[in-house]
Amino acid sequence: MKSDLPDLFPGFETRFVEANGITLFCRIGGSGPPLLLLHGYPQSHVIWHEIASILSAHFTLVMPDLPGYGMSSIPPVSGNHEAYSKRSMASVMREMMRVLGYRTFFAAGHDRGGRVGYRLALDHPDTIPRLAVLDILPTSDYWDRMNRVFGLKVYHWMFLAQPFPFPEKMIAAAPVRYLEHTLASWTAEKNLDCFAEGALEHTRAWFCEPDRISACCEDYRAGATIDYEHDIADRNAGNIIRAKMLALWGDKGIATSVDDPLAVWQAWCPHVEGHSLAAGHFLPEEAPKATGETLLDFFSS
């Protein structure tokens, strides 16, 4: 990966943290209670660069690259995709925070990071008193609602979950073209204007690596299999998210594929609040001020 990428977090510490056999690349900065910020697909920790200044005056921000993404190490591929399950990733994040000295912390996650976040809240309820998820619905709810219209909107779920190496080879044939099409198509304006050029440089640099393309596909294969099974097991057992929870979604985002995203989350969490923001899928970049201030209000209250 290129070593001359722009520094989007001036004054923040850069660290590599070992957790459960995974080496996680992190940006850490700010002061106050710890707040774990988790990115989604097809991005890395740099999604938070525009709102870090809003939150870092009140919280100590920990912004890792998820396993396999960005500059974190790449877990091995397996038949059951367990290393890329959100349960495994949640355990890695919990251990990373313990290594950093935090046994309890707030968490916010966008896209795949939101799935790691709600799995953290389900599996380790004493760890997270407050959780925010950005433009997602629970994994099993997406799959159970899959129909013609929904399938066209989230076609990548089925494409990326295809067996190795089909999606990898398709993406690797033109990775930057695929990346930029994906990013643009999920914004409200259907272009790349909301993304800082420096952030795009970071994403292009790692997304072209074949092993990381495969890691991203494994993430979605886990979503179609083991993650779904974990969600259904929790629903059947009557498990709920006990943390105070905030759900945000773009009014032109992916979560609007259902009529009432908040109602979906209320089946999982009795303490959830939420609303839409004027944006597509990428709230931290399309609506950084509104997203940052809403997160600040929620985690400060």
Image (cartoon, helix red, strand yellow):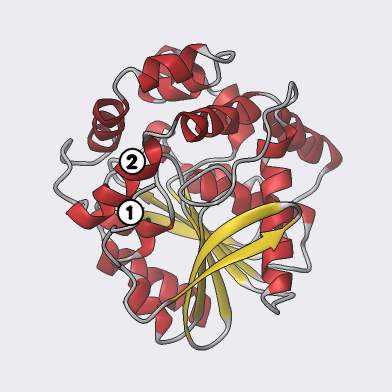
Badge 2 is on which residue?
253
Q: Report the front residue among 282 and 30.
A: 30
Residue 57 versus residue 105 in the image, above or below: below
Badge 1 is on which residue?
283
Residue 228 versus residue 22 in the image, above or below: above
- From the top left corner, tell me how far across and down residue 79 is, in percent: 74, 21
Q: CA distance from mark 2 to mark 1?
A: 9 Å
Give amino acid for label 1.
Answer: Leu
Identify which residue is drawn at 35% across, 53% down.
276
First reached walking from the N terminus: tag 2 or tag 1: 2
The answer to whether the residue labelled 2 contacts the one labelled 1, judged by CB atoms less than 8 Å apart, is yes
Identify which residue is drawn at 49% across, 82% down.
59
Identify the mark at residue 211; answer none if there is no mark: none
Q: Is residue 187 shown to the viewer in this render? A: yes
Question: Which image quarter: residue 20?
Answer: bottom right
Q: Is residue 281 shown to the viewer in this render? A: no
- From the top left corner, tell me how far across and down residue 178 is, in percent: 29, 26
Give amino acid for label 2.
Answer: Gly
